[in-house]
Structure formats: C-alpha cells, structure tokens
C-alpha cells in the first residue's frame, strides 16, 4: 500500500504563496531566479521521488 505524502501538496502551496507575494511586490521578483534554477528543482524532486520509492519497496 502506498503511503500518502504531504510533501507534494505542501511544496505546491508554498510555491503558490511565494509567487503570490512576489506578484504583490512583497518579495523581490522570483521569475528570473526560477527561470535559471528550474532544472535543479526538477532534479531534486526526481531524486526525492526515487528515494521515496526505494524506501517503500519491500526487501527481497
């Protein structure tokens, strides 16, 4: 059985809040930073998913 992780929803909510605050000029503009670092974000999320999958698979 797959466990329900709160990591994904929490990350999406946090990103939404950060970009919303950036749109209201409460934070500096984040799009240039995100545009430069999005490959690293994808790699980190992929590694996290692989680690989670390896922890959930039963030992043989």
Image: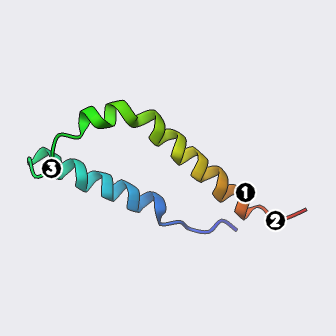
The total of numbered circles placed on residues is: 3
Quadrant position of the N terminus in the picture: bottom right
- Label disc, if present, on residue 11 of the rendered structure: none
Q: Position of residue 59 (x, y in %)?
A: 85, 64
* Sooner in the amino-acid sequence: mark 2 or mark 3: 3
Q: Which residue was labeled with disc 2?
A: 58
Is residue 3 or residue 7 the one in the foreground? 7
Q: Are marks 1 and 3 in contact (CB under 8 Å)?
A: no
Q: Which residue was labeled with disc 3?
A: 27
Q: Are marks 2 and 3 in contact (CB under 8 Å)?
A: no
Q: Position of residue 32 (x, y in %)?
A: 25, 32
Q: Is residue 36 above or below residue 30?
A: above
- For marks 1 and 3, give the one nearer the viewer: 3
Disc 1 residue crowd, few under 14, some 14–19, many 20+, Cα 10 Å: few
Quadrant position of the C terminus in the picture: bottom right
Disc 3 element: loop
Q: Are marks 1 and 2 in contact (CB under 8 Å)?
A: no
CA–CA distance in space, label 1 to label 2: 8 Å
Disc 2 element: loop
Disc 2 residue crowd, few under 14, some 14–19, many 20+, Cα 10 Å: few
Task: Point out the residue furthest to the right here.
Answer: 60
At 65% across and 50% down in the image, what residue appears?
A: 50
At 17% across and 40% down in the image, what residue appears?
A: 29
CA–CA distance in space, label 2 to label 3: 44 Å
Q: Position of residue 45 (x, y in %)?
A: 52, 47
Disc 1 element: helix
Q: Which residue was labeled with disc 1?
A: 54
- For marks 2 and 3, give the one nearer the viewer: 3
At 33% across and 31% down in the image, what residue appears?
A: 35
């Amino acid at each position: 059985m797959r466990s329900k992780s709160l990591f994904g929803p929490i990350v999406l909510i946090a990103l939404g809040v950060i970009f919303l605050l950036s749109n209201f000029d409460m934070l500096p503009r984040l799009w240039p930073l995100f545009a430069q670092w999005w490959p690293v974000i994808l790699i980190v999320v992929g590694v996290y998913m692989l680690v989670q999958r390896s922890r959930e698979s039963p030992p043989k």
